[in-house]
Image (cartoon, rainbow, N blue to C red):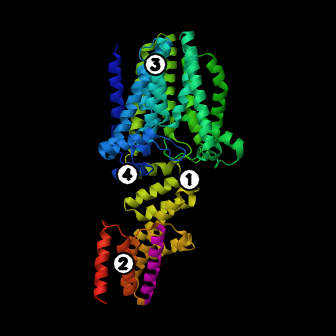
Amino acid sequence: MKLKPCYQILILAAIVLCVYYPALSAGVCSVDDPRIIAAYNAGAGKTLMDLFRPSGTYYYRPLIELSYYLDNLLWSMHPRFMHLENILFHALNTMLLFLIARQVAAAWSIKAPWFPLAGAMLFAVHPINTEPVTWIAGRTDPLAAAFVFAALWCLLRSLSTDRLLYLCPALLLFVLGVLTKEVAICFLPVAMLLAACWPAPARSRRIVLLVLAGVAASCGLLLSILAALSPTLSVSNLLGNQVGGPLAALRTVTAALGFYLKKLVVPFPLNFAIDAVSALYLVPAILFLLLVPFWLKKRSLAAVLGAACAIFLLPALVVSLGHVAWTPFAERYLYLPSAFMCLGVAGQASVLLERGNRQRWLLPAAVAIAVIAGSLTVQRTFVWQNNLALFRDTVGKSPGFGAAHLELGVALLLKGELRHGREEIETAERLNDRPSIRSLIKQNLMAVRLDEGDYQGAREYFFRNFDSLDQAGPEFLQMLVKADEGLARQAADAAVRDGIYRGMIGTYRLLYLKTRDPFNLYQSGKVAQERGDRAEAMAYFRQAVREAPADTHYRAAATKMLQRLEVGQ
């Protein structure tokens, strides 16, 4: 049976849409997604120039920022449309991989007619890709992969047709990929590997290799200059949190390699927060590194694609050394490597079946695997339907990861399960070793005490963490005021209540000094009025009216209160 390539492409697109259809209802993941939506919505005031201006962080990804900017313009950051984009990017990548496989099959004389369809189908349904496709913030990988695959297709067209003109769009697409996510830089060594091993005219290969080597040298020089000029981008800063020296770093990277190699073949258990890997993964990593040189000598398709897979794993190995992401290990980093692994497996299976004249078995075998893998991917997609299900799953698989307990606790609080939410966040506080979320944990623990009506407990928790009001940030001071408001309402003794009010005025005064927000002056005036101190209340209201913007609601209220107090003098 023969099926035209255009129909095979449509089948692949349909498979992706069917498998990932539940992701349309996945909503907003509490990790990174709210930050993205807040940063690019209409109120954020971002301009096109802002997107392309370096931010001074590890990342410079203007094209992924542009995609979120367009999300706001086109559909106001609606999660359903943003999920649909991710699914469509994955469908596009699957189709591009199919086209790449067709060129590879022609060059390596693979006679199995279903090899391109089988390889692309395995990639389409591979469970390891659920995270980058289903998570809004995971879009970086599918979008970068789209540019990488398109660049690779152009490169292979150049090698296959001996027309160097295809190199120009290949290099342009490569640059666009790098501007989407740094992992796209690995296109250069992979392109050089393919050019060196491609069964094409020697003249064409030499010219392509020369051009790619020149581009690689230019990129290396540019990165060296950037690293020298920017401490943020320096290797020493990236690895600053690594403990144990070079030997420990080598052990971490090698174990990460073994772990990722295993994940590509056996992706389970799927986990959103992988905070550590076993030292046993050193074994497969070392075996792989020992076998690769002998494997590459054959220049077989499986060897070349396996090496390409390993090259695209390199950025993930670097990330495992530092705290530059939510977790040091992540399934989303395997999006690009999984494509080459799937092609390699399908290619090797095609070669083996050809030897036994059983090429027709390839498609049924691929379909059987795809059905199993696709059903597991659908199940995983349902886990991503809501934060409570996702983080219950995550905590069950990474019980020692404090940040996961924090996210689960917040999800439980939003469901109204205050006691269980508080327990999870307290667990997060006990387990956490990351300074970046320490303050967030404390904010949530103080907030849950307020939600429970434990105002005294909230106040005591505040002073357990801060020796004085000056040490606390505005968010903690605002919660302290709420705690004092609750205590004032509960106070039966007038003297006690008056003391609480005096403390609240002091807190509001400090909030004003820290934020320069006149609303805190207005609040101070209201508290002073509650105390019966007319002169102090009038002084705060006057200052609030003088400093508040004309369009604020409390300016008019402060004006009325000031007039009433002046009339009563």
Sequence-first disc among 1 and 2: 1
Q: Name the amino acid, label 4.
A: Gly
The residue that label 3 is drawn on is 166
Residue 506, magenta (yes or no): yes
Is residue 84 visible in the rendered image? The answer is: yes
The residue that label 1 is drawn on is 400
State the SS at label 1.
loop
State the SS at label 3.
helix
In the image, residue 407 lies at what x, y percent? Answer: 46, 55
In the image, residue 319 lies at what x, y percent? Answer: 58, 42
Residues under labels 2 and 4: Cα distance? 32 Å
Q: Main secondary structure of the magenta part?
A: helix
The quadrant where residue 147 appears: top left
The residue that label 4 is drawn on is 45
Pointer 1 local density, CA inside 10 Å: few below 14, some 14–19, many at least 20: some
User: Depth-wise, is mark 1 or mark 2 nearer the camera?
Assistant: 2
Residues under labels 3 and 4: Cα distance? 39 Å
Q: What residue is at 43 percent from the left and 46 percent from the top?
A: 50
The quadrant where residue 366 appears: top left
User: Depth-wise, is mark 3 or mark 4 nearer the camera?
Assistant: 4
Q: Name the amino acid, label 3.
A: Tyr
Sequence-first disc among 1 and 3: 3
Sequence-first disc among 2 and 4: 4
- What range is drawn magenta here? 495-514
Vertical position of residue 565 compared to residue 130: above or below: below
Pointer 4 local density, CA inside 10 Å: few below 14, some 14–19, many at least 20: few
Residues marked 2 and 3 touching at CB (< 8 Å): no
Sequence-first disc among 1 and 4: 4
User: Depth-wise, is mark 2 or mark 3 nearer the camera?
Assistant: 2
Q: What residue is at 50 percent from the left and 53 percent from the top?
A: 404
User: Depth-wise, is mark 1 or mark 3 nearer the camera?
Assistant: 3
Q: Which mark is residue 542?
A: 2
